[in-house]
Amino acid sequence: MSFTDMTNWVVWSPQDKASGGLELHVLEGRRIAIREEAPIRLSSRQSQVLSLIVDGLTDAEAAEQLGISPRTVRMHADVLRVKLGVSRRRQLPLAYRRMRSLGRIELTLDGRPAE
C-alpha cells in the first residue's frame, strides 16, 4: 500500500480492495482511511462518553454527568479518536455519524456485543 501526507493527515490508498484494502472517505474536507472489514466496537462507557461529546459537552461537564474525572473522559475521548480514525476531538461527532450511517458502529454492554 502507498500513503500520501495531506496537511498532517496520512491517508492510505487502496491497491486491492479485495485483499483488505482501505476505503477512503471525506471528513471535514479531508480524506480519511477507514478499514471496511471490521466493525468498530464501543464499550458502554465509551458509548456514554461519545454521546455526551456529540451533544457538545466539555470534558468537565461530561465527567460531572458520569461521575468520573475529566482526565478519564479525556482518556476515553483519546481511545474514541483512534477507534473512529480522527485526529481531533472536535471531529468525533461527524466521524460517529458517518460510521453509524455505514453501519460500522457496534455498541457493547460490559465488553459483550449488544443484542
Image (cartoon, rainbow, N blue to C red):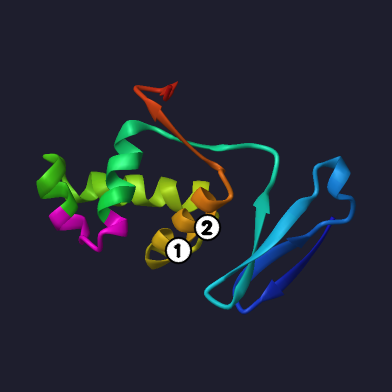
Say if 50 sits above or below 8 in the image.
above
**Which residue lies at the image location 61% right of the left edge and 79% below the top edge?**
7
Q: Are marks 2 and 1 in contact (CB under 8 Å)?
A: yes
Magenta span covers which residues?
53-61
* Magenta span includes 68: no
Q: Residues within 10 Å of mark 2 (few under 14, many from 20)?
A: some
Q: Secondary structure at mark 2?
A: helix
- Asked if residue 2 lies left or right of residue 90, the reply is right
Say if 115 sits above or below 53 in the image.
above
Which residue, given by chain and number where applicable, does mark 1 sit on? 94
Q: Residues within 10 Å of mark 1 (few under 14, many from 20)?
A: some
- Asked if residue 98 lies left or right of residue 13, the reply is left
Residue 104, x across and y down, in percent: 56, 43
Which disc is residue 98 wearing? 2
Dot 2 amino acid type: Arg
Q: Secondary structure at mark 1?
A: helix
Q: Nearer the viewer, residue 108 or 9?
A: 108
**Which residue lies at the image location 26% right of the left edge and 59% below the top edge?**
55
* Magenta span includes 60: yes
Dot 1 amino acid type: Leu
